[in-house]
Amino acid sequence: MQFALYIILKLFDLLLLSEIIAMETREVPPAHFLIKIESFSLFDKYKIKKYETSEFVAGEYKWKLILNFNGKDSDYISVNLAMADTSSLPANWELNAAFSIFLFNQKSGNYLHSPGITRRFQAMKFEWGLSKFISKEILCDPSNGYLVNDTCVFGADVFVIKREAAVECLSLENVDICYKHDLKISDFSKLEETWNSADFIDGGQKWKIILYPKGNGEGNKSHVSIFLSYLGSERMQICFTICLKNQLYNDKDTNDDKHVKETLNHWFSAAETTVGWRTFIELATINDPNKGFIVKDGCLLSIEIHIQAIACLPIKKSDYAISS
């Protein structure tokens, strides 16, 4: 299994490195490493094919550059970034890093560099780079400014990507499923400023109803105010309906005009838990015994909840990771 993974990684590596990366220029030098090479022509004279730089630290890890002067494509200089001293890392280690390779233009004072390349480094593949970083013809032409007085300067930026991103999982629910909950409020005339229902669970989530019998906000002293309160922590898109039943008609009566009913769509979250209506029904209407909303000092509420979407944060990497 590990051998097969190694072969796949090598093929992927060859595919990536066979392409010539579009290069960019900038004035700012690399942040993490520079190497000045003097008497560059002696590499070819003495048949030195490869040079590994000393180690440098970036993102709390040790790295080195590997320059290949006579690789598979003898017309190009290849430059790789490799992790150094991986023996101290835990088993099955892996990390992601964005890196750029630089070449100083001594004529313009700018740096030619590869745009940020993001790769996953791990025990079976701890070296990435560019097999065609720059052609020897361009490098060795003094008029281009990269090799002056037989001297050139390479460099590297390495930024380790830490796994601190918040990962959200959005789950769409079947809106055809309706969760219903009925409540009876007794001794309505004796209620204080605020009435809270017992917590109830619909759709696997905990809720409660908050009712202001004398009104709240713009409905104060003129309306009954009523709200649905969410007691969870996940973000949820909800379509909900609250109905105040007219008790002069039984449940089999399908005429909704006899009841007071309101519907809202809303994203609930830990930061936004409570939504409803400050002017749900006028006090004069609900207190009129001929209207049927209060019978024997009690009223009936019906709540319908459609959970349309749930957005949550997985705790473990395995909750959202894709097998490689």
Image (cartoon, rainbow, N blue to C red):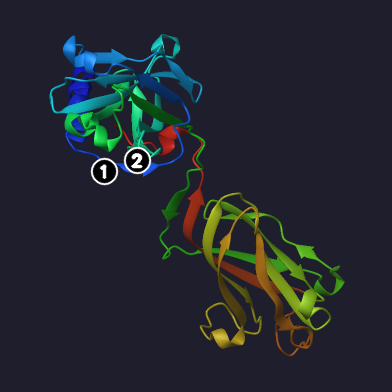
Position in image of residue 159 (x %, y %): 45, 32
Q: Amino acid at mark 1?
A: Ala
Mark 2 and mark 1 residues within 8 Å of each other at the beta carbon: yes
**280 lies left or right of 93:** right
Which quadrant of the figure has residue 157?
Answer: top left
Dot placed on the residue nearer the N-terminal end, 2 or 1? 1
Is there any visible trace of residue 275 in the rendered image? yes
> Is disc 2 placed on a helix, strand or loop?
loop
Q: Amino acid at mark 2?
A: Pro
Residue at position x 41%, y 33% from top?
A: 318
Residue at position x 65%, y 59% from top?
A: 272
Residue at position x 17%, y 12% from top?
A: 45
Q: Is residue 287 above or below residue 277?
A: below
Q: Nearer the viewer, residue 257 or 295?
A: 257
Q: Which residue is mark 1?
A: 22
Which quadrant of the figure has residue 287?
Answer: bottom right
**261 lies left or right of 87:** right
Which quadrant of the figure has residue 26?
Answer: top left
Residue 115, label in figure: 2
Alpha-carbon span between mark 2 and mark 1: 8 Å
